[in-house]
Image (cartoon, grey):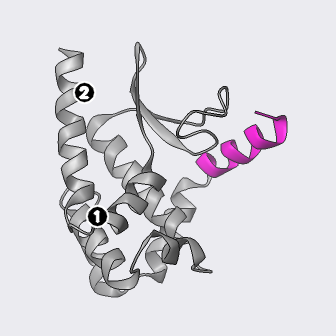
Amino acid sequence: MTAEERELFEYWIAHMDDALEEFSARLPSEVRGALDRTPSSLDALEAFLLERYPDPAAIRADPEPNLDGAARYVGEVYRRHIGGTWRMRDDDPSYVYAGLPELTFLPERDTPACPIRLVTTALHRRTGTFLSTVLTNQAKIIARARG
């Protein structure tokens, strides 16, 4: 990762709260009111995203940074309920999340979750509960690993 890319990532992390506030301000009041950073709030966010975007390409094409906002929100809910830290790997260009912000939950074992990919996968699968289901399953895996 270049020094500039590292600086941009650090800026991205440092401005997490501001970015989440900006994302929230763009949402309809009923959605905004449901986003209380609980696991169940992920279903409310997913319902909004499914209603607004027919597929992952649509959210990527949206001039509003809703993919970034939704990914930040998902990541912070995961971090709040499982723990973990944000990182960005660029040591291997073939790594599936290379250059994307991700969370890792165990320092002794690589346990990545990439919120941007979680959001786009939720739009692809269209279940309405993908984000919360992955959180529940990831929490169980991490809890077992922590012993």
Quadrant of the image occupied by residue 49: bottom left
Q: Main secondary structure of the magenta part?
A: helix
User: Image point 83% across, 42% down: which residue?
Assistant: 4
The residue pinned by badge 1 equals: 125
Question: Is residue 38 in view?
Answer: no
Is 99 left, or right, of 121 in this rendering? right
Residue 109 lies, with reference to residue 131, above or below; the image says above
Between 103 and 125, the one nearer to me in the picture: 125
- Considering every residue shown, the one lying at the far front of the view is 94
Judge whether residue 28 is colored magenta: no
User: Image point 57% across, 33% down: which residue?
Assistant: 95
Which label number is shown at residue 101?
A: none
| Labels 2 & 1 near each other (Cβ < 8 A) | no
Q: Secondary structure at mark 2?
A: helix
x%, y% of residue 61? 59, 77
x%, y% of residue 143? 19, 25
Q: Which one is closest to the eye, mark 2 or mark 1?
A: 1
Q: Which residues are magenta?
A: 1-14
User: Image point 50% across, 78% down: which residue?
Assistant: 58
Is 7 left, or right, of 23 in this rendering? right
Q: Closer to the N terminus: mark 2 or mark 1?
A: 1
Q: Residues within 10 Å of mark 1 (few under 14, many from 20)?
A: few
Question: Is residue 138 in view?
Answer: yes
Q: Amino acid at mark 2?
A: Ile
Q: Secondary structure at mark 1?
A: helix
The residue pinned by badge 2 equals: 142
Give the alpha-carbon distance from disc 2 to disc 1, as whole Å.
24 Å
x%, y% of residue 23? 49, 72
Is 28 left, or right, of 19 in this rendering? left
Residue 131 lies, with reference to residue 78, above or below; the image says below
